[in-house]
């Protein structure tokens, strides 16, 4: 095939003349074409990278969207679990532990620093760290709650023994005694000054029976036991669960040290031994090493009206009998 040539019309000669293209012009044309192609190629590549996703990028974006959706659902489920656990903790503190008279163990609130709504727009690393912290805190609370329920279960199993160990009756039969002095500061009839009165004085005839107010073991019995000279003849019963009862100024103790006694069992008789101004029983309830008001433990023997009357009598600041 013959090589094609370019012609150009010359208006001066009124004829077509053959166009001779030099090597320089050819190189210039080729360079321009190549440069233009490079510019178009770079522009297309830029647009492709920034506005057109590759199959791999599309897959990664789908995975990221799925990850965010899963994280959101996970934190929603964790929030429900935390609400349920919080209700269990409240029940444990305010119902179960109150029944068994033990202290609450849970803190008032659990703060994770942020809520999920505040971190949902954070980067994936921060979201993952937040969720891990939340899971760790939830695991710790669940473990703590498990230990608490183990303790509550043991307390429930021992509740029958605990109730038997709690002083719940008057040490002298109702109608055979009169409460003449209550718990608190009272004037001593022998020492002639006011001092703490750590029990109640129940006036009764000498020889009136005295009964154990709960199940327990006798730890002291007789005169001058454990250097309690001012109390005369005494009997002390350890009931367990932190409870002890003391019976003083007795004329005689029937029970002996180491003896197991039951609630309502005869342990001795009323007298006026020691620093006493008359025949009576000085009775104390000791809880965890500290004397408490015995009147609050007479509930098994008294009607509500009788309890109000004896509580009023016990509150009067008067002279005790010992």
Image (cartoon, rainbow, N blue to C red):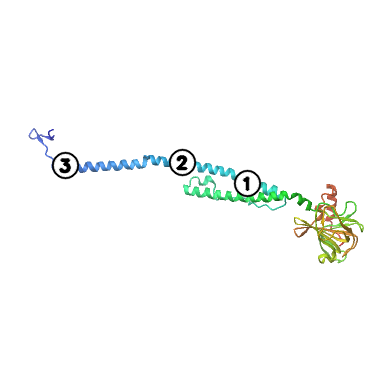
Q: In which quarter of the image is residue 282?
A: bottom right
Q: In which quarter of the image is the N terminus?
A: top left
The mark that comes first in sequence, 1 or 3, is 3
Q: What element carries label 3?
A: helix
The answer to whether 164 appears left or right of 55 in the picture is right
The answer to whether 149 appears left or right of 264 in the picture is left
Where does the image place residue 135, in percent across and percent down from the top left? Answer: 55, 48
The answer to whether 111 appears left or right of 179 in the picture is left
In depth, the one of 202 and 117 nearer the eye is 202
Residue marked by disc 3 = 26
Between the residue at mark 3 and the residue at mark 2, the CA separation in whole angstroms equals 55 Å
Q: Is mark 2 on a helix, strand or loop?
A: helix
The answer to whether 46 appears left or right of 137 in the picture is left
The mark that comes first in sequence, 3 or 2, is 3
Residue marked by disc 2 = 65
Residue marked by disc 1 = 86
In depth, the one of 290 and 9 nearer the eye is 290
Q: Is mark 1 on a helix, strand or loop?
A: helix
For disc 1, the neighbor class at 10 Å (few under 14, some 14 to 19, many from 20) is some
For disc 2, the neighbor class at 10 Å (few under 14, some 14 to 19, many from 20) is few
Where does the image place residue 185, in percent across and percent down from the top left? Answer: 81, 61
**Location of residue 162 with respect to 52 vertically, above or below:** below
Q: In which quarter of the image is the C terminus?
A: bottom right
In depth, the one of 19 and 304 nearer the eye is 304
């Amino acid at each position: 095939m013959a090589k094609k040539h370019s012609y150009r019309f010359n208006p001066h000669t009124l004829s077509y003349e053959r166009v001779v293209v030099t090597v320089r012009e050819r190189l210039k044309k080729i360079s321009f074409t190549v440069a233009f192609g490079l510019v178009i190629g770079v522009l297309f590549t830029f647009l492709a990278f920034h506005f057109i996703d590759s199959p791999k990028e599309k897959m990664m974006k789908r995975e990221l969207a799925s990850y965010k959706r899963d994280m959101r659902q996970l934190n929603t489920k964790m929030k429900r679990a935390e609400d349920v656990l919080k209700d269990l903790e409240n029940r444990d503190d305010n119902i179960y532990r109150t029944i068994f008279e033990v202290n609450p163990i849970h803190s008032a609130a659990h703060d994770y620093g942020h809520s999920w709504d505040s971190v949902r727009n954070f980067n994936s690393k921060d979201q993952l760290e937040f969720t891990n912290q939340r899971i760790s805190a939830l695991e710790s609370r669940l473990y703590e709650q498990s230990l608490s329920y183990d303790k509550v279960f043991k307390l429930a199993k021992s509740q029958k023994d605990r109730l038997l160990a709690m002083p719940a009756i008057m040490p002298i039969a109702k109608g055979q005694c009169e409460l003449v002095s209550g718990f608190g500061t009272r004037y001593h009839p022998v020492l002639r000054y006011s001092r703490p009165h750590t029990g109640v004085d129940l006036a009764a005839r000498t020889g009136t029976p005295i009964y154990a107010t709960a199940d327990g073991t006798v730890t002291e019995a007789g005169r001058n036991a454990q250097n309690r000279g001012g109390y005369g003849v005494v009997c002390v019963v350890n009931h367990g669960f932190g409870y002890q009862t003391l019976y003083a100024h007795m004329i005689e103790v029937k029970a002996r040290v180491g003896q197991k006694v039951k609630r309502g069992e005869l342990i001795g008789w009323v007298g006026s031994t020691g620093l006493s101004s008359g025949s009576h029983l000085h009775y104390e309830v000791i809880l965890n090493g500290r004397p408490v008001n015995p009147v609050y433990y007479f509930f098994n023997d008294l009607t509500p009206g009788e309890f109000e009357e004896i509580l009023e009598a016990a509150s009067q600041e008067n002279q005790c009998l010992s």
